[in-house]
Image (cartoon, rainbow, N blue to C red):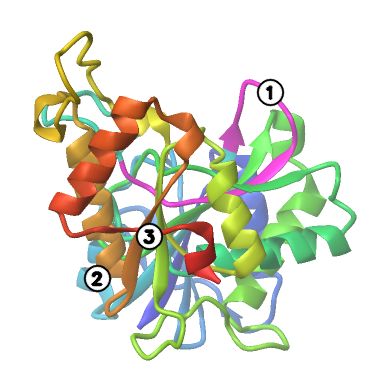
Amino acid sequence: MVTLVVATTLDPASINPAKALLTMPGWHHPGLVFDGIRSFINGDKLRLLEHDKSIIAEDDLDQRWENATGERVDEIIFLSKHTAVSNLPALTIHPIGIPHLKEGDEAPQGGRPGWAAPPSPRMGQWLILLKKIAQSHNLIPEFEITLEATHHGPVTSKPTMFIEIGSTEDYWKREDAAQVIALLVWEGLGFGEEASIGNWSSKSERKKVLLGIGGGHYVPRHMDIILKDGAWVGHLLSGYSLPMEDPGQSKGKPRAEDIGGTWKQAIKVAFDATEAAFPGGEILAHLDQKSFKSWQKNAIIEFLGQQNIKVGKPADFH
């Protein structure tokens, strides 16, 4: 089984970390070229794919690599830029998908409406490692180290995460940031002095996995638990990924089935994808309680119960 690391030449925050990664020992140049995509080989487990399109434009790279090589893909890591209205420097990690969109909706940043990739089980532990490496390279406190909520494509079917440098061109081009991202991948996959981290096993003593529901794009209340406890983390659905139609002045407490919008679809898709990434795990929904109105929170909790999805409190993830 192999790990695919994917970069595009169109994005300095993508190709520069890839170039830094290629300076590490053991690479074979070049590997297979398929569909115009160049590959580089390191041992029997690591593959770097480099293309010339938008990072979200190449769907099904996992399946296409398997078809071209016969190698089974275990996970995918995309290197990319991050944009934010704040323009502040940041290093971010996030799962991908657009589970809240309906069939036929436009997908402006890739992916397929109503879809989410299995989230990489590595995300929580790699966030902690990223902070450590960034600190050692003096990028903190200049750069914020954070998770982001689930969003955008491309379509994949294997555990996937994006690792990004933000938030303006000056930061995208920073060589020190690129080096930190390259080291995160190298050390996180176990090519450095320590063993790889974030490897899920159904035999893990800690089986509880956080499914984040609610909050803003940078999911601070979910991230507090992950940083404190090193919790396993699955999909992270911010408020904008939970469209709920306000029941208005309806009599009595509105029922989950009476509240329109694609919020139920988003939760179910995110849960199923998280469950696929953590076979044998116990998926617990963690709600950002303060981000919901009472009718929203009640409806979500009712729906979670109907789906036999347990709600977890912060103490449950210790």
Find the distance from the CA under tag 1 to the CA under tag 2.
Answer: 42 Å
Residue type for callout 3: Pro
Identify residue for label 2. Answer: 68
Query: Closer to the camera, 240 or 249?
Result: 249
Q: Residue furthest top?
A: 249
Identify the magenta region: 82-97
Q: Secondary structure at mark 2?
A: helix
Disc 2 and disc 3: Cα gap in Å?
24 Å
Tell me residue 220's x, y (percent): 60, 43
The answer to whether 161 is drawn above or below residue 196 in the figure is above
Read off the residue under disc 3.
119
Look at mark 1 in the image and give the residue it sits on: 86
Q: Quadrant of the N terminus?
A: bottom left
Which residue type carries mark 1?
Ser
Does the magenta portion include 127?
Answer: no
| Mark 1, secondary structure of its residue | loop
